[in-house]
Amino acid sequence: QTTALAAAAEFTHHTQEHHSTMAFWGLKVEPGKWTPFVPPPEDQLRLHISQATLGGGIPGDKERIIVKCRSEAEDDEERQEFNICTLIGGVQESCGLDLIYSGYAEFCVEGSYPVHLTGYFMPEYGDSDDEDDEMDPSGE
């Protein structure tokens, strides 16, 4: 069963101009099975994946576990798969990531062990109404 945790832990992020809530997120990805991430209905949230860690068991020495991702493609495009990290038994069993998703994506593990992906939902700051952000071409 897919395990997705949202809002297991919440914290508030303050800046001078923004006040927003971020929520913990986690997903257990099983070997050989594409596991979906469905974005929350709030349009203003993006997912930041910050860590991949072995999710159980002890892999053999230098056994490779590859985490893959694919996302939605345009109607006329073929969906592509990308390796986002490789975990190696006894060498590297967790990996820091800096990946941001705003739409549907799927994750899969190539190897014999599950992987936990963790991160948090973050607000979308792209649309700002601040007049200071817009500058007249003359510099005024």
Image (cartoon, rainbow, N blue to C red):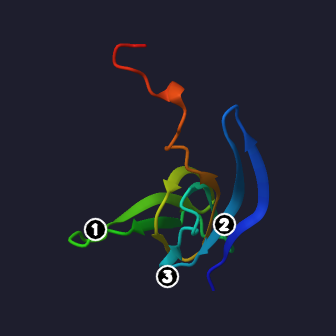
Disc number lying in front (2 or 3):
2
Q: Quadrant of residue 117?
A: bottom right
The percent position of residue 110, horizontal first and vertical second, equals 47, 73
Compared to residue 111, the image places residue 89 above or below, namely: above
The percent position of residue 94, horizontal first and vertical second, equals 63, 56
User: From where the camera sits, is residue 33 visible?
Assistant: yes
Other residues around mark 1 within 10 Å, as few (<14) / some (14–19) / many (≥20): few
Residue at image point 57% right, 78% down:
30
Kind of residue at badge 1: Glu
Specify the quadrant that holds the C terminus: top left
Q: Which badge, 1 or 3, is on the more N-terminal residue? A: 3
Q: Which residue is mark 3?
A: 33
Separation of residues labelled 1 and 2 (CA atoms): 27 Å
Specify the quadrant that holds the N terminus: bottom right
Query: Which element is circle 3 on?
Result: loop
Q: Nearer the viewer, residue 67 or 87?
A: 67
The percent position of residue 70, horizontal first and vertical second, equals 40, 68
Say left or right for 101 vs 42: left
Q: Nearer the viewer, residue 75 or 108?
A: 75
Disc number lying in front (1 or 3):
1
Q: Which badge, 1 or 2, is on the more N-terminal residue? A: 2
Q: How many marks?
A: 3
Q: Which residue is mark 2?
A: 26
Q: Which residue is mark 1?
A: 74
Other residues around mark 3 within 10 Å, as few (<14) / some (14–19) / many (≥20): few
Compared to residue 138, the image places residue 125 above or below, namely: below
Compared to residue 23, the image places residue 126 above or below, namely: above
Query: Which element is circle 1 on?
Result: loop
Kind of residue at badge 3: Lys
Separation of residues labelled 1 and 3 (CA atoms): 23 Å
